[in-house]
Image (spheres, coloured by chain):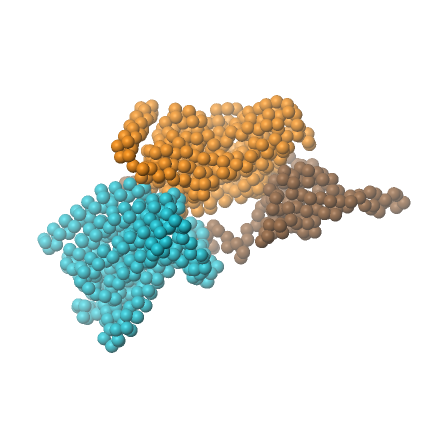
Chain colours: A brown, B orange, C cyan
């Protein structure tokens, strides 16, 4: 068989792709793109979309703020007295969060803060729709970070052969 | 093979001499053209100053540094885990591959080794980032030569690879997944099966690109015999990776050095090409993408069970010493020379990135070519600006 | 139009012609941009293209035009301002002049004169002037390179185009485009008149050379060295913005449309269908509905041809300047010369 010239083959590739795209979705065709605001792709469970904060767990230990490579976490706290655990005990001293801000304009989504947090207060959420027209509005405070807590998914099951992890 | 190389070298020299003679005889006033820093062919902010005689390049000089981000200096004031997040951004298309040599160097200093499962997964992700990187090159090549469609194919199929990387590591572009002593996390369930599907897809993509682009006569006439780099010149300029292998030098760090990674456990081939022209460089990359999908496929079948993290202290202090580790990254040899003084962070890090050395040959290889060939040679040398400027 | 010419005053005829010409230029341009540039290209790249403006993105072009019209009309400081501003118009004028000779139906044409082919080939090179003006006056090295390349390329490909049309002219024995159309539909190939005699079949080599030259004249890939957005940053169009860029853009696709019209007139039988299908004996026997149906048939043929032009454009990489010059002079010109010779010999023999 004589060799098909490469140029004709090239035309064939584009024509085939066009036929595949025009073919209805039901028959396995369709475009590879997603019409974004109308339909959305769901990011994988581990996707690093936004950092959510569980305020109750935070002890303002500042580990996250110190380990952040570009210092985008701002924490302020004051000492407070919490009611004692047992009746009759002395009131406990706790750190109460006044401010926990993350500047997402600075954040480079490395995830070090989530990893170093010893008290399970920070989580990754795959949520991604929080763009702002003004860069200053990307500084989010603890209420906003707390709201994202609802979007945090369960950690995915692991592939065969993985060791069970202890704790976090 | 040597015969061919010799003949090519001779013909190249003859062509250069003829051009030089022509220029002397015709004494025309030249024109200086700045290609870049804002130019679509430099995919980033590389500036190449060329002196033209008509459309022929008489003299060319790359001027790098428009995107210098000072990573070598930054690493001196960051801790080891933070450095991993930074160096992701050097070669931003194959970012996982950037982490590996640095982590290996740190592990060498601490005298620990990642468990076999971690080594395996590292190698898989390394090859996936190579595929993500090079598949984009294959598409981008089309755009540089004026074909609009391949780049969309490349973005389409690279997306699947990025999705894989994201579902394993959490980050599409900047995984930050490597840790000293192992990996951050194990693979999620179902990942292996999905990866096999995607590898099949990518092999189809390679065939498509071969039909659409590499088989095209116009494409071949644009690249064959253009920008020939003989093997000894390539070695002298310190080229590495596919650029070097395209000149016929059988040199691949994945095979030629023993690292605690899994390449020696699978069966694969190092491709070389005797021609050393632009087409050879592109063809080598196409073959390597195919080879990578095969490596990934074989590695997926043989992932050993076990932990993914060696025993490391929670706060990492690297003992005093110096270590050099380099790996065969998508763009070529990438290495880190880490000097530690026993602190939380390195004392000094020297980054050897592939693209910086690869573009050093630009003044040599661009002499005497036409302006359209400048673009195709630059495209075939394949650099990434982050990798040049760091 | 000549149907109406009898009972309309001159000013009304002129108005009608201007309106008709505008429609004949803009409608194909819009069709090509939407059908091929927006949709076919997207489908070939596994995507859907513009979808938001209008149903299935059909009003996207209007959105784009609106955007361009809002943009500032910038001219570089060192540009030769008058020439710079005029250049896009010169390019567009060539398109309008081209459409003047295209016959759309038995009586629906703007002009009908005997040197139609000659006029068409002459007028089509006016756009070269405009491109050269744009490249030179922009005061930009990239534009200059692009302009010079464009001039060299357009002149090189003008020649095979002329030579390939000569084959048709010899076979038809006339330079009048209307008569060429009628000959094709009225004719017969070796006694078989079921298809008429479209010159596509008898002048296939000429057709190929013509289409390749058209591709080059339109500076579409693989002949888009003058534009070459990845190396010359769109060549002669680099410095243009807003309204003037829009004119270049329209001119590019309108010219693609008009050249496809001309190619279908020359090779595909133009507005007509083989007359034997309807039992028409000669031109006078043609039913009047062809004045409405003819343009539709012609536009259908045009869409097919420009579809092929665009298909090639989206699939191929571009040739280098010296390669495409060599291709024109060493391949296309000899082929079309041989074609002329053979046509002439056969014309004499039969």
* Image coordinates for residue B227, horizontal then vertical, percent: 36, 33
In the image: residue C156, left or right of residue B212? left
Q: Residue furthest right?
A: A88
Residue drawn at x 34%, y 50% as measured from the top left: C137
Q: In the drawing, does residue B246 fall left or right of residue C269?
A: right
Name the outermost residue toward the bottom.
Answer: C7
Residue under the image location 35 percent in, 32 percent down? B367
Residue B42 found in image quarter: top left
Rendered view: B146 above or below B81:
below
Image coords of residue C174 (percent x, y) = 16, 60
Which quarter of the figure has residue C327? top left
Q: Does residue A25 sit above or below B332 in this rendering? A: below
Asked if one can make out residue B286 in the rendered structure from this viewpoint, the answer is: no
Q: Residue at x 50, y 44 (%)?
A: B160
The residue that appears at 21% across and 65% down in the rendered structure is C112
Which x, y percent locates residue B337? Answer: 56, 26
The residue nearer to you, when weighing C286 against C243, is C243
Task: List x then y, in percent, for residue A100.
Answer: 70, 46
- Looking at the rendered structure, the number of numbered marks drawn on it comes to 0
The residue at the far top in this view is: B321
- Comparing C69 with A54, the one in front is C69
The N terminus of chain B: image quadrant? top left
**Relative to the observer, which residue lies in front, C166 or B185?**
C166
Left or right relative to A32: residue B375: left
Residue B82 visible in image: yes
């Amino acid at each position: 068989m004589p060799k098909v010239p490469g140029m004709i083959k090239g035309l064939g590739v584009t024509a085939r792709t066009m036929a595949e795209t025009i073919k209805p979705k039901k028959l396995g065709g369709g475009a590879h793109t997603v019409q974004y605001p109308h339909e959305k792709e769901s990011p994988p469970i581990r996707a690093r979309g936004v950092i959510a904060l569980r305020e109750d767990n935070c002890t303002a230990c500042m580990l996250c703020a110190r380990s952040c490579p570009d210092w985008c976490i701002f924490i302020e706290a004051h000492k407070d007295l919490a009611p004692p655990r047992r009746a009759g005990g002395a009131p406990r001293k706790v750190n109460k969060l006044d401010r926990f801000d993350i500047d997402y304009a600075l954040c480079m989504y490395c995830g070090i803060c989530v990893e170093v947090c010893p008290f399970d207060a920070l989580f990754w959420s795959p949520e991604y729709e929080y763009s702002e027209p003004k860069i200053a509005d990307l500084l989010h405070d603890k209420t906003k970070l707390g709201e994202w807590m609802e979007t945090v998914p369960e950690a995915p099951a692991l592939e065969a052969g993985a060791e069970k992890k202890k704790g976090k | 093979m040597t015969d061919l190389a010799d003949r090519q070298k001779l013909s190249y020299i003859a062509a250069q001499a003829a051009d030089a003679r022509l220029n002397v005889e015709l004494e025309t006033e030249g024109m200086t053209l700045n290609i870049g820093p804002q130019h679509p062919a430099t995919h980033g902010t590389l500036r190449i100053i060329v002196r033209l005689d008509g459309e022929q390049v008489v003299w060319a000089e790359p001027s790098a540094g428009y995107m210098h981000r000072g990573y070598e200096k930054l690493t001196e004031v960051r801790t080891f885990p933070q450095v991993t997040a930074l160096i992701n951004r050097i070669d931003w298309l194959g970012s996982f591959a950037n982490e590996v040599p640095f982590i290996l160097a740190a592990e060498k200093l601490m005298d620990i080794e990642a468990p076999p499962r971690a080594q395996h997964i590292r190698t898989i992700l390394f090859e996936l980032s190579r595929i993500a990187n090079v598949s984009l090159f294959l598409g981008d090549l089309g755009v540089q030569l004026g074909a609009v469609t391949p780049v969309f194919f490349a973005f389409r199929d690279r997306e699947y690879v990025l999705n894989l990387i994201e579902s394993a590591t959490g980050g599409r572009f900047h995984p930050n997944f490597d840790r000293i002593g192992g990996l951050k996390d194990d693979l999620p369930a179902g990942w292996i099966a999905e990866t096999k599907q995607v590898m099949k897809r990518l092999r189809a993509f390679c065939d498509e690109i071969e039909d659409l682009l590499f088989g095209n006569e116009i494409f071949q006439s644009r690249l064959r015999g253009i920008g020939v780099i003989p093997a000894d010149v390539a070695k002298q300029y310190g080229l590495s990776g596919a650029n070097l292998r395209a000149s016929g030098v059988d040199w691949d760090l994945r095979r030629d050095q023993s690292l605690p990674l899994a390449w020696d456990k699978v069966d694969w081939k190092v491709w070389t090409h005797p021609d050393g022209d632009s087409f050879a460089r592109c063809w080598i990359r196409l073959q390597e993408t195919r080879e990578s999908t095969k490596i990934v496929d074989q590695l997926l079948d043989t992932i050993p069970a076990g932990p993914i993290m060696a025993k490391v202290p929670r706060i990492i202090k690297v003992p005093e010493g110096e270590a050099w580790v380099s790996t065969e990254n998508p763009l070529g040899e990438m290495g880190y020379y880490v000097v530690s003084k026993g602190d939380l962070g390195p004392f000094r890090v020297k980054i050897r990135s592939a693209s910086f050395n690869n573009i050093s040959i630009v003044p040599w290889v661009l002499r005497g070519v036409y302006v359209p060939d400048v673009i195709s040679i630059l495209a075939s040398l394949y650099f990434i600006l982050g990798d040049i400027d760091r | 139009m000549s149907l109406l010419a009898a009972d309309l005053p001159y000013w009304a005829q002129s108005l009608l012609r201007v309106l008709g010409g505008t429609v004949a230029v803009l409608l194909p341009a819009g069709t090509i941009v939407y059908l091929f540039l927006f949709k076919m290209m997207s489908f070939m790249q596994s995507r859907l293209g513009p979808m938001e403006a209008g149903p299935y993105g059909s009003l996207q072009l209007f959105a784009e035009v609106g955007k361009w019209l809002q943009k500032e009309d910038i001219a570089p400081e060192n540009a030769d301002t008058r020439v710079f501003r005029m250049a896009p118009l010169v390019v567009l004028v060539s398109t309008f002049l081209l459409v003047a000779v295209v016959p759309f139906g038995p009586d629906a044409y703007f002009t009908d004169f005997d040197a139609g082919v000659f006029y068409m080939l002459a007028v089509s090179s006016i756009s070269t002037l405009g491109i050269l003006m744009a490249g030179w006056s922009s005061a930009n090295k990239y534009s200059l390179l692009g302009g010079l390349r464009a001039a060299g390329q357009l002149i090189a490909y003008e020649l095979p185009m002329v030579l390939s049309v000569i084959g048709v002219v010899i076979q038809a024995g006339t330079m009048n485009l209307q008569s060429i159309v009628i000959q094709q539909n009225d004719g017969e190939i070796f006694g078989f008149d079921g298809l008429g005699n479209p010159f596509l079949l008898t002048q296939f080599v000429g057709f190929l050379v013509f289409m390749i030259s058209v591709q080059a004249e339109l500076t579409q890939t693989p002949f888009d060295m003058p534009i070459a957005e990845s190396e010359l940053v769109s060549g002669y169009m680099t410095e243009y913005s807003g309204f003037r860029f829009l004119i270049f853009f329209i001119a590019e696709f309108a010219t693609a449309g008009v050249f496809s019209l001309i190619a279908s007139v020359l090779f595909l039988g133009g507005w007509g269908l083989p007359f034997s299908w309807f039992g028409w004996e000669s031109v006078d026997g043609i039913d009047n509905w062809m004045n409405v149906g003819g343009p539709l048939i012609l536009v259908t043929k045009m869409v097919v041809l420009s579809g092929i032009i665009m298909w090639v454009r989206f699939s191929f990489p571009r040739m280098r300047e010296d390669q495409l010059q060599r291709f024109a002079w060493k391949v296309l010109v000899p082929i079309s010369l041989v074609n002329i010779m053979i046509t002439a010999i056969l014309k004499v023999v039969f």
